[in-house]
Amino acid sequence: MSRVDHAEASSRFIEAKDHADFHDQRLWDLRGKRDTESRKLPEWEALRMLASQIKEHTLSHLADYLEEFERNAKANGIVVHWARDAAEHNETVYRILQQHGATTLVKSKSMLTDECEMRPYLARRGVEIIETDLGERIQQLDDEPPSHIVVPAVHKLRADVAEVFARHIGTDPGNHDVPYLAESQRRHTRPYYLKAQAAMTGANFAVAETGSFVVCTNEGNADLGANIAPLHIASIGIEKLIPKLEHLGVFVRMLSRSALGSPITQITSHFRAPRPGTELHVVLVDNGRSERLGMADFWRSLKCIRCGACMNTCPVYRRSGGLSYGSTYSGPIGVIIDPTFDLRKYSSLPFASTLNGSCTMVCPVKIDIHAQIMKWREVIAQRHQLPMVKREAMRLAGKVLASPRLYRAAVEAAAAGIDHLPRTLLYNPFNAWGRQREVPAAPALTFRQWYLKHRGGKP
Amino acid sequence: MKVGLFIPCYVDAFFPEVGIATLQLLERLGCEVHYPLEQTCCGQPMANSGCHADAAGAEALFVRNFAEFDHIVAPSGSCVHHVRDHLTAIEQTPDVLAVRTRTVELVTFLHDGLGVREFPWAEFPHKVALHIGCATLRSLHAASTSEVAGLEFNKPARLLQAVKGLELVPLRRPDECCGFGGTFSVFEEPVSAKMGQDKVQDQLDAGAQYVVTPDMSCAMHQQGCAKRLGAPLKYLHIAQVLNGARA
């Protein structure tokens, strides 16, 4: 796999100024709504602490809670499958579909199925898949992955959506009216709900005590799918467990407030058992999670409830777009989990951060995101995955800065260089600083030289 | 009070006036200030790039230079954040740990350490936007942040309020990162520059004439963007204003 070049991809994103500015403002607005909503709950910070503790407890007893969930789910009549990795997940889903003769699948949002690259796998085997979430459907029709884990098409303007729909579902390309576009998609999708032999959902939470799982949505598409088709398959990452139903309130109160700044999602559905005459299957997926759980510096990333608050607040994400990360998971949370999938491919991502720390402070489950980003940089350097130019620059900088003599020579030469180089030489293609910025004017004396001159210290 | 003055490499090389203002201000406030002549850098650039081993030499030198001081003060939050929270490439001897906990960012030292609230010599009759670097803000807690509800406080603003004639103008996104980020500014140049341009626009829209900051590295980047954009903004370190700079 070739390395993701985040800087290069972000450059293309920023070139489309209207899109870039809209994207930044749209997500900043979500961050602002999150601030307003969270401030309405005086116990917000206590909730964050509680949520973090519940997740850390669950993750450190995960095997027990998974077995409890399986026992209780089976007792409810759910068929439970285990998948070690993406391949096993996809094979399991395909096998279930085959057993039911299902060739059309209506699917609601699930980052996990994207992570497993399930859609192309099933498509190659003749299964027709319809994403029913509006944003996911836009992205599916445009043959792009979601750019945000909550608002998948947030990088598109209305006109872009009109263009995609005109191309694929026959809408008027000149009509950019949002209700028109949404209604057109709804009308286009409705027949598939009736036709599909199977529905698929993800899950936001799986409750060990009850063997049930919870799906939080805003469009009703997950429920429409799951309540019409004779077969419902839910793919669930093993980190989605919580011990008891009474814990759910802690997370539900924070999920949508963190994500969109709304008090709660429009629909919070509890799935406990198959409807009479139908089947309900759950696929519990590991796909690297157990390995991550064993990483002392990174296991806390498994607390994530996929609200996207870290993405909304991230100034780098807002100005580079989710697709620039070249991965299912983008933004700060992506930066800390993507390298667990492929260190080399995603080795540039931990450097796509200014370490400003805003992500950590909005995270509803208190993941120390920016500290983990910093830690990944160290791992990447240790595993020799830094670009040569950065590696050598740091080796040299380390030598110079460890020696007062070399340091003074370098500082004085830098000042002279800035002063004496002609502008055309100073602002060359190799000077990334100077592409869109002036370099500071060189002073007549460094501070040290001034100090020696005016305070008479001995050099 | 005896103070060891740490002047970070980029201040030494590009902003000597910030070092001078810091020195003079501390002396004015009654400190006995020493500037160890063999100092270079705290090791942050290497450590932030993941190259901890390469930071060890600079870190060891830093500790040697400052081990004798009870108070080590620097006019730069991110460097202080590195020393306090990330200076870990060398063995953590009692000397190293002592230097780390004794290193303090200038505003924190003035506000909490010396408890100064009056700067009778300072007058700055201009509209000022305050920029607090992210390390100073979210790691050293110089102010409350927009992410967390609760008691609101702002130490740099509190100090600047004592300056005659100075008017702080509010930004739309007061604690959004400006995009400097050390080597980020070069290796992620497109996003870094875009963030800097957006920051400059926010400052312009607020009607600011000056931007005042405890973090000159952020200002170096913002000033670079502003100059290229032709924006009539001037950037000063808070030490300069508190020391009586008029413009």
Image (cartoon, coloured by chain):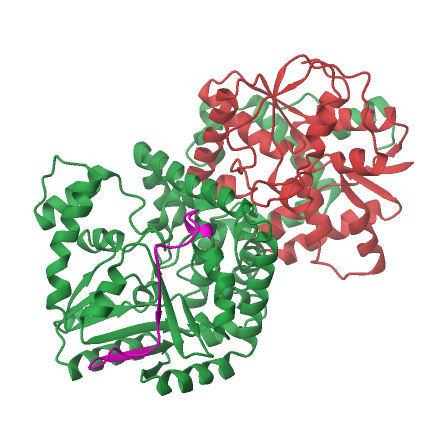
Residue A15 position in % (x across, y down) = 32, 35
Query: Image height check: is A372 above or below A355?
Result: below
Q: With A76 as the anchor, is A431 left or right in this view?
A: right
Magenta extent: A257-282
Magenta span contains residue A276: yes
Q: Residue at x 43, y 34 (%)?
A: B194
Q: Quadrant of residue A93?
A: bottom left
Quick one: which chain is red? B
Query: Image height check: is B28 above or below A115?
Result: above
Q: Can residue A294 be spotted in the picture?
A: no
Number of numbered discs present? 0
- Which residue is at the front of the view, A220 or A435? A220
Q: Quadrant of residue B237?
A: top right
- Which residue is at the front of the view, B117 or A454? B117
- Which residue is at the front of the view, A128 or A444? A128
Residue A332 position in % (x across, y down) = 47, 53
Query: Image height check: is B221 above or below A55?
Result: above
Image quarter in which the N terminus of chain B is found: top right
Residue A235 position in % (x across, y down) = 32, 72
Quick one: which chain is green? A
Residue A187 position in % (x across, y down) = 12, 52
Q: Can residue A258 be spotted in the picture?
A: yes
Q: With A433 as the anchor, is A409 left or right in this view?
A: right
